[in-house]
Image (cartoon, helix red, strand yellow):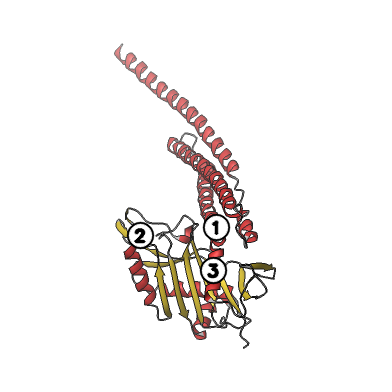
């Protein structure tokens, strides 16, 4: 197969979590030691380096279960300036085995270089296909590594877990080419294609770009990619929150539609409590949604209005526009209607109940007076 005169890589969002029985004391060095041991236990890993700012050691008490990356609610731990660089060898036979469930075959190369960075916005992963043929698909490589690491970490005992946030792969194949006629740092061109687009970068190098060229490009891209996944994480969190709110609404609707006797105080109280809770949760959801939109606009401004080179704004802005317009007002209005109706029904029940009690008491008094004559 003809080898390409370019560096090809895909982008994803991977993270290595840290799970201990709570409560526990977290220390950065313990996490790094456990992570290093877990990765070295993989026979496929042949190069590994883990760097972080050792002057920013963290130690704190963890009282409750921590968030996972795929939840969209954040991730744990956050280690300042964490940089994980590893090379993985995955034979074609194993590739076909891992990708069998997706109908895919081998990638075209057995060697991959992974760089995982802790950016301002969150974790970012770059995966290069080493010595790859022209027809190699780096997005397939990201998918392969995601599935492979997920499978292998299920076999590893210890506190380290493998987590990822979709879309992993990022919906584009990335190429870096040398162009000695180019005297800027990087130029870029997005080539629309069926399926995933192709993003082609050029740097002022003759022949195959060096490792330093590629790492410089990674550093140029990590802000935009980090913002992309930060927005995606927020979208995922709201999708899950909305799903919970809909289930809450469905439970209340079932209570309202349930056939019961007219005088059923317990049922009326249950409706009142459920509608009150739904109103509170809907207000909270709407407020958080507005705050998230404001934060997103501020992040976009910070990233794109400072005059630095931009490369992936098409993808980031498209992702930013994908936060749905949830019908919070409709759910809130219905819940308020049910809540007000439950108040009126409770008043009617109270009047009827008071009348019945009054009638019974009056009968007893009359009977008592009659027996005393």
Q: Quadrant of residue 40?
A: bottom left
Depth check: 99 or 226 in front?
226
Quadrant of the snapshot with the N terminus: bottom right
Residue indicated by mark 3: 216
Q: Residues within 10 Å of mark 1 (few under 14, many from 20)?
A: many
Q: Dot 3: what SS?
A: helix
CA gap between label 2 and label 1 equals 26 Å
* Nearer-N-terminus badge (2/1): 2
Depth check: 166 or 354 in front?
166
- Residue most extreme to the bottom: 1
**Label 3 close to label 2 by CB (< 8 Å):** no
Q: Residue 275, image x and y in percent?
A: 50, 39
Residue indicated by mark 2: 55
Say above or below: 60 vs 4: above
Q: Dot 1: what SS?
A: helix
Q: Can residue 143 be seen here?
A: no
Q: Residue 230, image x and y in percent?
A: 52, 57
Q: Nearer the viewer, mark 2 or mark 1?
A: 2
CA gap between label 3 and label 2 equals 24 Å
Q: Nearer the viewer, mark 1 or mark 3?
A: 3
Depth check: 32 or 279 in front?
32
Q: Residue 86, image x and y in percent?
A: 45, 75
Q: Dot 2: what SS?
A: helix
Residue indicated by mark 1: 227
Say above or below: 207 vs 239: below
């Amino acid at each position: 197969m003809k080898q390409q005169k370019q560096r090809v890589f895909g982008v994803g969002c991977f993270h290595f979590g840290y799970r201990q029985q709570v409560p526990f004391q977290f220390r950065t060095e313990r996490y790094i030691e456990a992570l290093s041991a877990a990765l070295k236990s993989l026979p496929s890993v042949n190069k590994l380096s883990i760097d972080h700012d050792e002057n920013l050691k963290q130690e704190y008490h963890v009282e409750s279960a921590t968030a996972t990356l795929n939840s969209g609610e954040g991730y744990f731990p956050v280690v300042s300036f964490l940089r994980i660089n590893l090379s993985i060898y995955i034979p074609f036979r194993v590739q076909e085995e891992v990708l069998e469930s997706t109908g895919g075959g081998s990638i075209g190369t057995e060697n991959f270089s992974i760089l995982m960075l802790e950016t301002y916005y969150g974790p970012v992963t770059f995966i290069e296909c080493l010595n790859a043929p022209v027809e190699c698909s780096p997005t397939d490589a990201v998918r392969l590594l995601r599935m492979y690491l997920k499978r292998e970490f299920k076999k590893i005992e210890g506190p380290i877990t493998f987590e990822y946030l979709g879309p992993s792969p990022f919906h584009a194949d990335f190429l870096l080419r040398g162009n000695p006629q180019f005297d800027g740092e990087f130029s870029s061109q997005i080539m629309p294609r069926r399926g995933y687009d192709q993003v082609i970068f050029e740097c002022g190098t003759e022949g195959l770009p060096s490792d330093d060229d590629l790492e410089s490009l990674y550093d140029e891209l990590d802000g935009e990619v980090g913002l992309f996944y930060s927005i995606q994480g927020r979208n995922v969190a709201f999708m899950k929150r909305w799903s919970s709110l809909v289930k809450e609404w469905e439970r209340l609707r079932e209570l309202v539609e349930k056939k019961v006797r007219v005088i059923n105080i317990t049922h009326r109280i249950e409706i009142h409590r459920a509608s009150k809770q739904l109103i509170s949760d809907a207000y909270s959801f709407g407020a958080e949604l507005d705050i998230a939109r404001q934060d997103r606009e501020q992040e976009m401004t910070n990233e794109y209005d400072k005059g630095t080179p931009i490369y992936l704004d098409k993808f980031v802005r498209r992702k930013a526009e994908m936060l749905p317009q949830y019908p919070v007002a409709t759910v809130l209005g219905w819940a308020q209607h049910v809540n007000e109706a439950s108040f009126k029904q409770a008043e009617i029940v109270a009047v009827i109940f008071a009348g019945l009690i009054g009638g019974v008491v009056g009968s007893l008094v009359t009977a008592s007076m009659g027996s005393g004559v």
